[in-house]
Image (spheres, helix red, strand yellow):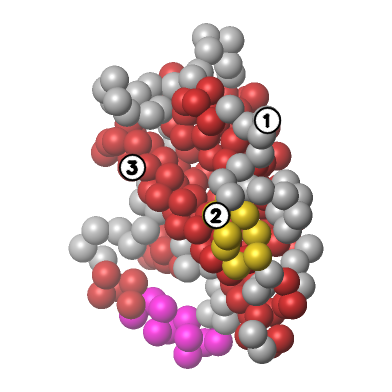
Amino acid sequence: MDDSLAKQYLEDALSNFRAYKKLAERGLEQASDEEFFVSLDEEGNSLAVIVKHMVGNMLSRWTEFLTTDGEKPDRNRDLEFVITPQTTRAELITEWERGWNCVFNAIESLQPEDLMKTVLIRGEAHTVVNAINRQMTHYGYHIGQIVFLAKHFKSTGWKSLSIPRNRSGEFNAYLAEKTVEGATAVGQNRFDAPQDFIRDTAEAKDVRGS
């Protein structure tokens, strides 16, 4: 793989992982401590369980990423879906940070020449590119669950994390204006743009109403 393309891929992968983390946290912060531990039915996972499972996956997959199998022998995946009465939200969020730091540190240490190397996950060979893409889709899947659950609990009090309903045209015009002004940065986190739009239009409305 061309070095410039490989470097761009690694930068983009790191940016996307950071964006997904921020998206999940914007959802989690809208859930109360009680809601954090609630599952919708016997087969459903609570926010707490999803966080715990993602942490277990991150620590297993990204610790010694290039040199050991991504499924570590000391990982107990089944226990990731068990929340004891003593478990606190603060403890899980501390672990959440530890898991993501493991992801970021592993990717930041990669060099362009590493991308076509082979790593193992449960004994199955992957190129580094394949392994990164596998984890990105896996985390995106669970972060979608986090946002869904948080939105369900918050109901009409939900603060939108995407383009607000019935405002797509207004959002597109906002982006076009920002592009003309040169205020849209190349590679900007795509999840940030709707939040900027919501904030800026709310501030403009407040100014007009004052």
Type of amino acid under label 2: Glu
Horizontal side of 190 relative to 76 (left or right) equals: left
**What secondary structure predominates along the stretch shown in magenta?**
helix
Q: CA distance from mark 2 to mark 1?
A: 18 Å
Q: Is residue 144 left or right of residue 99?
A: left
- Residue located 46% across and 51% down the image: 138
Cα separation between marks 3 and 1? 31 Å
Relative horizontal placement of residue 185, taking residue 203 as reference (left or right)? right
Nearer-N-terminus badge (2/3): 2
Task: Give the residue number, with chain letter if any, for mark 2.
Answer: 124
Residue drawn at x 72%, y 49% is 68
As for residue 174 lying within the magenta part, the answer is yes
- Nearest to N terminus: mark 2 or mark 1: 1
Residue at x 41% of width, y 41% of height: 146
N-terminal of the two: label 3 or label 1? Answer: 1
Q: Which residue is found at the position 21% from the left and 63% from the top? A: 166
Q: Residue furthest left?
A: 166
Task: Kindly identify the amino acid type of the residue bearing the numbered disc 3.
Answer: Phe
The verdict on residue 11 being magenta is no
Residue at the top extreme of this rendering: 85
Task: Tell me the tag on residue 148.
Answer: 3
Identify the element where label 3 is drawn. Answer: helix
Where residue 152 appears, x then y in whole percent? 29, 36
Q: Nearer the viewer, residue 33 or 178?
A: 33
Nearer to me, 128 or 193: 128
* Residue 85 visible in image: yes
Tag nearer the camera, 3 or 1: 1
